[in-house]
Every structure is written in structure tokens, then in C-alpha cells.
Image (cartoon, helix red, strand yellow):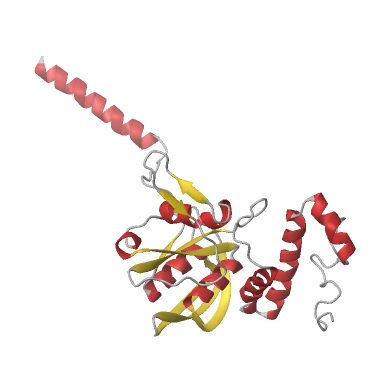
Amino acid sequence: MHARRFRYLGALALAGVWIAGAAPAQTVKLGTRARSARTGTMSVTAKPQGSGHLLTIRAGNADAAALFGEIASKAGVRILMPRTLRGVVTASFDDEPLDNALRVSAASAGLTVRKVYLPKETAATATADTVAALSAALSNVAANATVVDVTSGRSVVLAFSNTAPKVDAGLSAVYYVFPTPRTGVKTSDSGSTDEAVANASAALSGLPTQQKLQAVRDLQRQMFESMTDEERQQMRPQGGPGMGGPPPDGFGGPPPDGFGGPPPQ
């Protein structure tokens, strides 16, 4: 009886081997999908100067998150970003102060940098979500607003200024990098037009000539696309060719009249 059972089981085992040999071979790989290889090159050098750092950066289509991570490591600062941050940085400059280096690098990838001062013990453990909520005050809160917690009675007054704050020795800076708001978002800080122009100029200054010209064209197009019909109509009397109608000449082609020549009188 037992011998018959063993012969029966042996036959099943041999049949299983034969079926497995007849079936096409399959390979199953377990684990997460491999991340696509990042392209681009970058190098970051930081040297101390006073209480800060001067940065020398060479970045060609560098992954933005990786570049800012490298800057944080070399300069010894905290730079926080959303997990979904995307963008590539192309920039080249020597011995730029940290804040300006971050701003120019971020702008080339369509990103914005905010600097948040926190007590040192808080800065060391702050998360991107926490700093994002604080930095949003510049965009989403009315100037000099007072926020009151009805439950506890605590309140905070948000005072806006165009001057650099005096930083207490007990505070530490945390940088937050995020995608630049596109349309329908106005900053509460009543920054001047001169400041906006200066920021754009600084962002373009580190680019080679051809990339600079292309960036100007791209900026024109984005500005045009972000305007409402009313704003386009308001721009028409100010002499902008095509403002209020189709995009001005020079989008994707040669720059409009005035670019490359002397500034208007």
C-alpha cells in the first residue's frame, strides 16, 4: 500500500518536472521600479565669508532638488522642498552670496526661494510643510493683518516691510524652495516694480547670451499668457506691440524692437 502510494507520488513529481520544463521560462523581478537616470551636470563649491558663504556653481540641466541638496550640504544650511519638486537648473557663476546664488539658481528652473527665521531648536527639526505655511504669508495674507485664535486668545500681527529684518542671534535661517506661483496669485508685500525688475535681472544675469535672450522671450510669453483681457487692453496704449491682441512679434523669433539696442530715453 505504502509502496503504491510512493510510486504514485513519484509519478506526479516527474510529471511536474516535465510540465515545468515544457513551459516557457519566466523571470520575475521583485522590488520598486528603478528611477530614471538623471541627466545634466553640476558642481558646487562653497567658501566661508563672514557669517555666510560664497558659492561657485556650474550647473547644466541639473536636477533642481539634487542641486539644492548639494548646496545645503556644502554651505551647511537647511533647504527644504516639497517632495514633488521638479525642475532643471542651468546656471554658472562665481563667488555669489548664498541668498543670491539660491535665487538665481531657482529662477532658472521656475522656482522661488523664501527664507524663514526660526528659533534654532525649531529650525533644526522644521518640516517642509511647516515652513511652507509660514512662507505663504507673503503671498496669501493681507499686509499688516492680525490673526486671532479665538479659542486661546493668542494673536499675531503680520507686518510687511521692504527692508531686511534685524535677526536675533537666537534665530536660524531655513530656506524653502517651491514652484513659482503662476497666475492669479498676488503677493501681499507691496514690493515695487523696481524690485521685480531687479529680481528678474538678477535671475538672468548668470545665463549665457543665447539662453538669456531665449529666457526674455519665454518671460514675455508667460507674462502675456498670465494677463487678463482687461490687463492686455490697458497695456495697448503703452506702446507694447500687439498687447491686447496676439502675442507681440519676437515670441520664438528675433527679439522685439528695442532689444539689443540702446535703452529708451
Q: Is residue 120 visible?
A: yes
Q: Is residue 240 above or below residue 7?
A: below
Q: Of 96 and 14, which appears nearest the observer? A: 96
Q: Residue furthest front?
A: 153
Q: Quadrant of the N terminus?
A: top left
Residue closest to the eye, 169 or 43: 169
In the figure, is residue 163 to the left or right of 214? left
Q: Residue furthest top?
A: 1
Q: Quadrant of the C terminus?
A: bottom right
Quarter of the rendering containing residue 76: bottom left
Vertical placement of 52 versus 4: above or below?
below
Q: Residue at x 67, y 52 (%)?
A: 183
Q: How many marks?
A: 0
Please name the residue shown 77% across and 58% down the image: 224
Residue 4 image point, x, y percent: 15, 17
Residue 241 in percent (x, y) is at 88, 65
**Residue 160's x, y, as percent?**
54, 62
Q: Can residue 83 be seen at all in this image of the molecule? A: no
- 173 up-or-down from 129: above or below: below
Snapshot quadrant of residue 166: bottom left
* Of the pair 41 and 193, the residue shown nearer to us: 193
Q: Is residue 256 left or right of residue 41?
A: right
Residue 110 drawn at (x, y percent) = 60, 62
**For the view shown, which residue lies furthest in the left direction?**
2
At 80% from the left edge and 65% from the top edge, which residue is drawn? 251
Horizontal arrangement in the rendering, residue 43 relative to residue 197 (left or right): left
